[in-house]
Amino acid sequence: MIKVMSLMKRKDGMAFEEFRHWILVDHVEFARKIPGMRKYISNVLRTENPDAPFDGVSEMYFDSEQAMADAFATDAGKAAGGDAAAHCSNRFRMVCDEKLQF
């Protein structure tokens, strides 16, 4: 299984509380519709930090990189990506191997 981490900075002019609601509530509805995604976790700063390079991180789990590519190529995957692009000024995607250390 692979883990995809999407690090996100809210768009300019977007209030921090508005971003928190979007990443924890609104965007989750898009993620639910992506086929093949095994697990989805939303992470967001507890308090606003203007110096932080990112405000939130989404964690997405797929069986393989091919499953990830196939999922993001669907209408639901494209819609989720469009929703993220509309709410973020910067996004960085990391495709990772996850290993529980303790």
Image (spheres, rainbow, N blue to C red):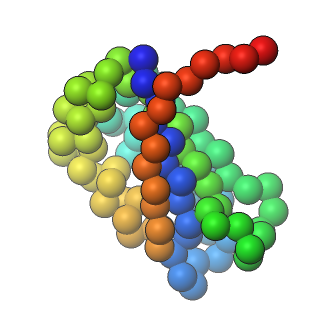
In the image, taking residue 2 as reference, residue 44 lies left or right, namely right
Q: Position of residue 17 (x, y in %)?
A: 69, 67
- The foreground one among 44 and 30 is 44
- Which is more toward the observer, 66 or 60? 66
Within the image, what quadrant is residue 74 found in? top left
In screen coordinates, is 36 left or right of 19? left
Q: Position of residue 52 (x, y in %)?
A: 71, 67
Q: Quadrant of the N terminus?
A: top left
Q: Quadrant of residue 82?
A: bottom left
Would residue 26 be visible to someone looking at this image? Answer: no
Q: Nearer the viewer, residue 18 or 52?
A: 52
**Residue beneath the point at 33% across and 54% down:** 81
Task: Work out which quarter of the rendered image holds the C terminus and state it.
Answer: top right
Looking at this view, name the residue that lies furthest to the right: 47
Q: Residue at x 62, y 55 (%)?
A: 56
Q: Is residue 76 above or below residue 85?
A: above
Q: Is residue 83 above or below residue 69?
A: below
Note whether 49 is above or below 70 in the view shown: below
Q: Is residue 23 above or below residue 31?
A: below
Picture residue at 47% right of the left edge, 68% below the top: 90
Q: Could one spot residue 62 in this view of the protein?
A: yes
Give how far across and how far down residue 18 sits, in percent: 62, 68
Residue at x-position 30% and y-position 28%: 65
Total labels: the figure holds 0
Looking at the image, the residue that sits furthest to the bottom is 13
